[in-house]
Image (cartoon, rainbow, N blue to C red):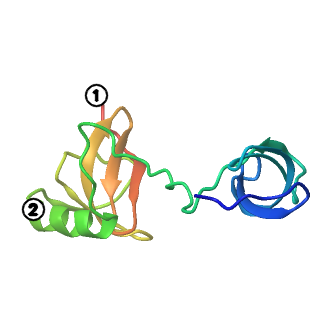
């Protein structure tokens, strides 16, 4: 139970506008525990409310049906170990198949994951890239 406060006395209260516990001034008093207070920071007048603990932070939830994906480096290592395709030097005019290992002069070794018209998606050690190719879907 709160001790009675006089008008113009300072009290710590939860400001509804600032969203934190701040110093307030009692503006009106109705009985022993009901006060109308004014925030000393923003000037907002509101009924007295004490919140000892801050509100819980919002946490994003995982989408349904999705699994947390592995880091790119771990995915690359697993795909390279499981790849059974041929090892090819990358050229834009070549035709690739899923599972082929591609040797790129700038990005290094990668594995073909997906095929599309005139391109293929290759997983390299740092990230997945769409690369030009002569593939026809």
Decide if residue 132 is on the left or right side of residue 78.
right
Q: Residue at x 31, y 48 (%)?
A: 94
Number of marks in the image?
Answer: 2
- In the rendering, which numbered label is found on residue 83? none
Quarter residue 106 falls in: bottom left
* Residue at 18% from the left image edge and 61% from the top image edge: 79
Q: Earlier along the polypeptide chain: callout 1 or callout 2?
A: 2
Residue 29 in the image: x percent, y percent? 81, 46
Q: Position of residue 19 (x, y in %)?
A: 69, 52
Helix, strand or loop at disc 1?
Answer: loop
> In the image, is 20 to the left or to the right of 28?
left
Q: Which residue is mark 2?
A: 82
Q: Residue at x 32, y 54 (%)?
A: 122
Label 2 neighbour load within 10 Å: few <14, some 14-19, many 20+? few
Direction from residue 49 to residue 1 in the image, left or right: left
- Of badges 1 and 2, nearer the viewer stands 2
The residue drawn where x is 83% and y is 64% is 10
Q: Nearer the viewer, residue 15 or 11?
A: 11
Q: Which residue is mark 1?
A: 137
Q: Quadrant of the C terminus?
A: top left
Q: Nearer the viewer, residue 129 or 118?
A: 129
Asked where in the image residue 39 lies, by quadrant, the reply is bottom right
Name the secondary structure under disc 2.
Answer: helix
Residue 114 image position (x, y, % from top left)? 27, 42
Identify which residue, 68 or 128, lies in the foreground: 68
Relative vertical location of residue 70 with respect to residue 34 in this rendering, above or below = below
Residue 61 percent across, percent down from the top left: 37, 46
User: Gap in Å between the C-alphas at discs 1 and 2?
Assistant: 24 Å
């Amino acid at each position: 139970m709160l001790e009675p406060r006089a008008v113009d006395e300072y009290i710590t209260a939860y400001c509804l506008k600032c969203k934190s516990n701040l110093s307030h001034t009692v503006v009106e008093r109705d009985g022993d525990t009901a006060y109308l207070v004014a925030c000393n920071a923003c000037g907002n007048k509101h009924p007295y409310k004490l919140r000892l603990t801050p509100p819980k932070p919002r946490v994003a939830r995982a989408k349904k049906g999705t699994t947390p994906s592995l880091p790119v480096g771990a995915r690359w290592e697993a795909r390279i170990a499981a790849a059974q395709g041929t090892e090819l030097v990358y050229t834009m005019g070549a035709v690739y198949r899923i599972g082929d290992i591609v040797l790129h002069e700038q990005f290094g070794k990668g594995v073909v994951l997906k095929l599309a018209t005139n391109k293929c998606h290759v997983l390299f050690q740092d990230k997945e890239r769409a690369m030009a190719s002569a593939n026809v879907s």
